[in-house]
């Protein structure tokens, strides 16, 4: 990745707060048209993954703002009769709840559309589609700072962990802590990176 004024360095060893700011700025530098085009290409890449085509149960985030848009992915997974689960934040922790249609979602604690609460038990996910501010080519992830996904991955079987990001947010390496959970696959509009 070339280093420019509006992009983070390809290798970053500074503090996470500064890195998050640079990643947000880089993502915000893309136009809405670029993000729509890139999201559409990412959707095609995701839907072509063997882990997705073979999956029965998928945990997927609901995109907001300038994140990689997941609505097309969710719609097409639902049309192919996959069981889709979405995040819900309750008492500071992320839970997975079944997706039963867009009309059932309401803004949650973080203003992200969430499904209603239910009492799922023993769900094993084949794939988790994961948001992040940035990812590395070796599967490292930097999120928004609350630790929801890292905590959830440590306490649930998320199956194949797939990170979704625009290519300008994929770096060679990222600072990590011992509790950070990496990805098995990172998907951008340009490529599919399998880490394994």
Image: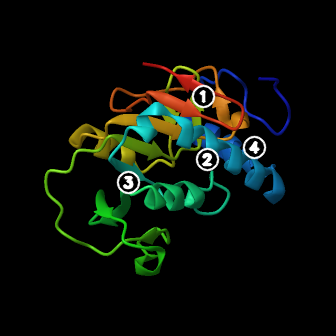
**Which residue position is annotated with label 2?**
43
Q: Which mark is residue 82?
A: 3
Q: Earlier in the sequence, mark 3 or mark 4?
A: 4
Res. 172 in view? yes
Q: Earlier in the sequence, mark 1 or mark 2?
A: 2
Circle 1/circle 2 CB separation < 8 Å: no
Mark 3 or 2, which is nearer the eye? 3
Q: Which mark is residue 85?
A: none
152 or 124: which is nearer to us?
Answer: 124
Image quadrant occupied by the N terminus: top right
Mark 1 to mark 2: distance in Å?
A: 11 Å
Mark 3 to mark 4: distance in Å?
A: 34 Å
Write the residue at 78% across / 35% down.
7
Measured as percent of width and height from the top left, residue 86 is found at 38, 60
**Which residue position is annotated with label 4?**
26
**Which residue position is annotated with label 1?**
192
Mark 1 to mark 4: distance in Å?
A: 20 Å
Residue 15 lies left or right of residue 81; in this view the side is right
Circle 3/circle 2 CB separation < 8 Å: no
Measured as percent of width and height from the top left, residue 131 is found at 51, 47
Write the residue at 61% across / 43% down.
20
Measured as percent of width and height from the top left, residue 88 is found at 35, 64
> Please, is residue 14 above or below residue 78 in the view?
above
Mark 4 to mark 2: distance in Å?
A: 21 Å
Res. 148 in view? no
Q: Earlier in the sequence, mark 1 or mark 4?
A: 4
């Amino acid at each position: 990745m070339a280093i420019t004024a509006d992009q983070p360095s390809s290798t970053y060893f500074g503090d996470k707060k500064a890195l998050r700011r640079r990643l947000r700025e880089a993502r915000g530098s893309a136009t809405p048209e670029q993000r729509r085009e890139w999201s559409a290409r990412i959707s095609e890449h995701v839907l072509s993954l063997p882990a997705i085509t073979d999956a029965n149960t998928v945990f997927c985030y609901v995109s907001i703002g300038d994140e990689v848009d997941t609505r097309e992915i969710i719609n097409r997974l639902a049309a192919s009769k996959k069981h889709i689960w979405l995040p819900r934040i309750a008492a500071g922790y992320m839970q997975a709840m079944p997706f039963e249609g867009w009309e059932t979602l309401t803004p949650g604690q973080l203003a992200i559309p969430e499904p209603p609460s239910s009492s799922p038990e023993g769900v094993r996910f084949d794939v988790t589609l994961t948001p992040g501010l940035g990812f590395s080519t070796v599967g490292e992830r930097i999120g928004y700072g609350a630790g929801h996904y890292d905590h959830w991955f440590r306490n649930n079987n998320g199956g194949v962990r797939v990170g979704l990001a625009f290519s300008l947010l994929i770096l060679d390496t990222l600072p990590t802590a011992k509790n950070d959970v990496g990805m098995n696959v990172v998907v951008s509009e340009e490529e599919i990176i399998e880490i394994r």
